Amino acid sequence: MRIAMIGSGYVGLVSGTCFADFGHEVVCVDKDPAKIEALNAGRMPIYEPGLDALVAENVQQGRLSFTTDLKPAVAQADAVFIAVGTPSRRGDGFADLSFVFAAAREIAEAVDGFTVVVTKSTVPVGTGDEVERIIREIRPDAEISVASNPEFLREGAAIGDFKRPDRIVVGAEDPRAEESLREIYRPLFLNQAPILVTGRRTAELTKYAANAFLATKITFINEIADLCEQVGADVQQVARGIGLDNRIGAKFLHAGPGYGGSCFPKDTLALVKTAQDAGTPVRLVETVVAVNDSRKRAMARKVVQACGGSVRGKTVAVLGLTFKPNTDDMRDAPALSIITGLQDAGARVRAYDPEGMEAAKPLLGEVAYARDAYDCAEGADALVIVTEWNAFRALDLARLGQIMADRVLVDLRNVYDRASVQRHGFRYVSVGRPDGEAA
Ligand code: UDX
């Protein structure tokens, strides 16, 4: 199949590259000439493990190319995927669809022959209808079918997720669209990936419902963690105890500083708005959004408490800035609220992240950036693990104990166990576990 991918951001680039790797002929289009130039020179605009090698291989095989020129890419394509951004609109939180609709207009002007137009961006229910209306209005003669095919990729694990998905969801309104998408994903059926074909609106809502459910699961265990701290229980054991029940499932029950990233915060807000507009508010999700927002700020207070009630004039070392490991993405990262909260409380903040520091700099004021975890901890009064990068999982605690001004470790990802940290004379505070005082 010949595929045009409109938008070479995270979703477009990963999906386009993986489709090329399946053997399809893929052209990735983007309006940003600098991005396309970089991609053509083999430089990735994002950090995603394994992506650069996969891009290089498929470019070399002649199956993958990059261009700013939408028209020929669309004209030659059997399927056009819309993978442009849908940021939260300022003010009401609704997804900003201006990029999607602009892409639809450009596609309308360029299509030639039967073409399936597929929305891959996460879009509110009914967007497929609007894309179809826009294209038909501009080109009543166009032979198109508009489908929805949401992605469920996790940053940092996107290539693996694409090649071994739990399921593929296709929202198609006619057999031709369904057939094209089955053909595009055929290589995955060899791995027995289930495909679920639904109506377009159902597919669109499925994506929001999945993300809202996962965000709810995380928020649930985070609240249970707070309760554990008060009653002397251990949230990790509670999570295991409930997660072994197949009806609940073990994943996404890891308590922490609150969810962040490019999807959960934006998609939960958009679902809340869609539901309000439909006159059927999703109160549970509304609460999840509010609880998660306040949790991120509460984490700064947790650090202050661990430091004996004040951080004024103290140096706090923060390990991990990105919203999760293996990405350079800072969007809605808990570190942003935590660092701002610590600064408001009078702390000096020093930070280190293996990939996220460049993206963090414009978002944070007055932070000193370190070369590595030990450089970050040197002379600090407290060390806070905000993101669980592998590099922070086996720190040399004896060395940290020697170089820090005070031995306080706040582990917001429950990476360490209390006994081994306390053995080195640290005061150890984690999330939802009986922490006790330094031995
Ligand atoms: C998510 C969805 O998983 C993916 O299916 C969707 O397509 C896009 O949104 P992503 O944002 O890349 O993917 O990250 P994910 O691994 O889901 O983590 C999201 C946030 O939740 C992170 O901040 C992470 O630290 C947090 N999280 C996740 C927890 O706090 N606890 C958990 O148990 C799991």
Image: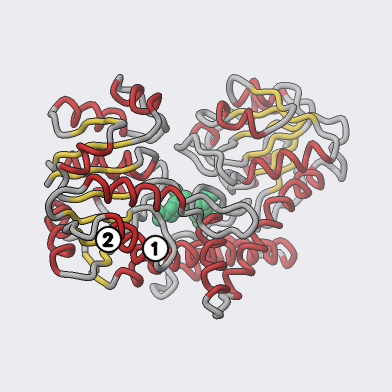
Looking at the rendered structure, the kind of residue marked 2 is Arg
| Label 1 crowd (10 A; few <14 / some 14-19 / many >=20) | some
- Outermost bottom residue: 280
Q: Nearer the viewer, residue 193 or 206?
A: 206
Q: Is residue 130 above or below residue 199?
A: above
The residue that appears at 40% across and 51% down in the rendered structure is 100
The residue that appears at 53% across and 62% down in the rendered structure is 270
The residue that appears at 23% across and 70% down in the rendered structure is 173
Left or right of 107? Residue 224 is right
Q: Nearer the viewer, residue 127 or 154?
A: 127
Kindly report the distance in space between the C-alpha atoms of the residues bearing marks 2 and 1.
14 Å
| Residue 22, image quadrant | top left
The residue that appears at 57% across and 53% down in the rendered structure is 89
| Residue 189, image quadrant | bottom left
| Label 2 crowd (10 A; few <14 / some 14-19 / many >=20) | some
Q: Position of residue 106 (x, y in %)?
A: 32, 45
The residue to which callout 1 is attached is 127
Callout 1: SS:
helix
Asked if the residue at label 2 sits under 8 Å from ligand 1, the reply is no
Q: Position of residue 194 (x, y in %)?
A: 21, 64
Residue 136, disc: 2
Q: Is residue 250 visible?
A: no
Q: Is residue 258 visible?
A: yes
